Amino acid sequence: MSTLITHEALEQSLDWSGLIGRLREWYRENAVEAPARQVLTIRQPDGSEGSLLIMPAWVPGESIGVKVVTFFPENASKGLATINAGYLLFDGKTGEMQAALDGDTLTARRTAAASALAADYLARKDATRLLIVGTGQLAVPVAAAQCAMRPYSRVSIWGRDPSKAAAVAHELCELGIAAAAVDDLKAACGAADVISTVTASTRPVVHGDWLRPGTHLDLIGAFKGDMRESDDRAILQAQVFVDRRDGATMAGDLAIPLAAGLIDPSHILGDLSELSQGQHVGRQDDAAFTVFKSAGMALQDLASATLAHGQVMLG
């Protein structure tokens, strides 16, 4: 009989240190097979568009998983979540279904953990100031995961709606993280050591000339070609790393400067597998700009789902 793993169970079973360690281990082993994700457009009667993402992965003989995600940007104006997801986990030997998991929580936690893992390689070791740009579903878990990796003394939250930024900051304070809302994004970017963007923007919200040398920019929100959170300069001046090349280059932050000929594929210096396996050491210069562009990977989902399932079955 398959198990239903809820939001609460995932929160309990996927603690940040354990989850980040799990991802590091799986990236080192590099045993997951994962076809490129499908992104299908769903046209709505009112003329708007949604997206359906399908992300399968498996470790032969061990586990099989598939995540199905919907992205409906118009939901934001209705007070509804823009992203909804479900995850199915199967036995890799028999094909039997083992569990159905809350895909929203799974996605939020694995995304946050992957960014925290990347920052471990790419952010300066003396980084103390974190800025979260955006106030949606990922804002709190991304801040929490980053703070699990190093002791940030200052966490700032910026959002287009100041009341939402204040709410995120309040929630983080309740988790024991010293956070505060800010209203001047340019100044906040200039003061930050690490910046994580978690928006659904189609225009740059962070500009390269706002950043100080040594800044690590963690671009999370954009996953389609018409979405971007950074401008060209932020990419051109940086040492760029990704979670996976084929997925990350589909997102506008990289797809747009690639299409314009401003950069070529060699501008991407490494991915999370190469960083975790030591094929690239990551940051080597405290004055360098670094960028980590993530668009999500099925490996992260399967690693997280199997960890959660194992924890739940242990009781």
Image: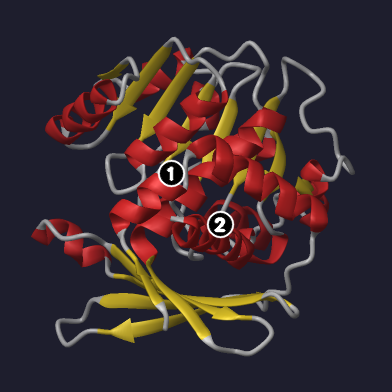
Amino acid on which the number 2 mark rests in the picture:
Leu
Query: Which class describes the residues within 10 Å of circle 2: few (<14), some (14-19), or many (20+)?
Result: some
Placement of 215 over or under 261, stated as above or below: above
Q: Quadrant of residue 45?
A: bottom left
Q: What is the x, y in percent for residue 271?
A: 74, 50
Residue 123 visible? The answer is yes
Q: What is the x, y in percent for residue 173?
A: 26, 21
Q: Quadrant of residue 102?
A: bottom left
Instruction: Work out how far the residue at label 2 is from the one at label 1, CA to CA, in angstroms.
Output: 36 Å
Residue at disc 2, secondary structure: helix
Amino acid on which the number 1 mark rests in the picture:
Pro
Q: Residue at x 87, y 40 (%)?
A: 278
Residue at disc 1, secondary structure: loop
Q: Quick one: which residue is furthest to the front in this view?
A: 315
Number of the front mark, 2 or 1: 2
Residue 204 — which label?
A: 1
Q: Quadrant of residue 91?
A: bottom right
Observer-nearest of 67 and 234: 67
Q: Quick one: which residue is furthest to the right in this view?
A: 279
- Mark 1 or mark 2, which is nearer the start of the sequence? 1
Q: What is the x, y in percent for residue 273?
A: 77, 51
Residue 64 — which label?
A: none
Circle 2 is placed at which residue position? 307
Q: Residue at x 22, y 37 (%)?
A: 160
Query: Which class describes the residues within 10 Å of circle 1: few (<14), some (14-19), or many (20+)?
Result: some
Observer-nearest of 284 and 93: 93
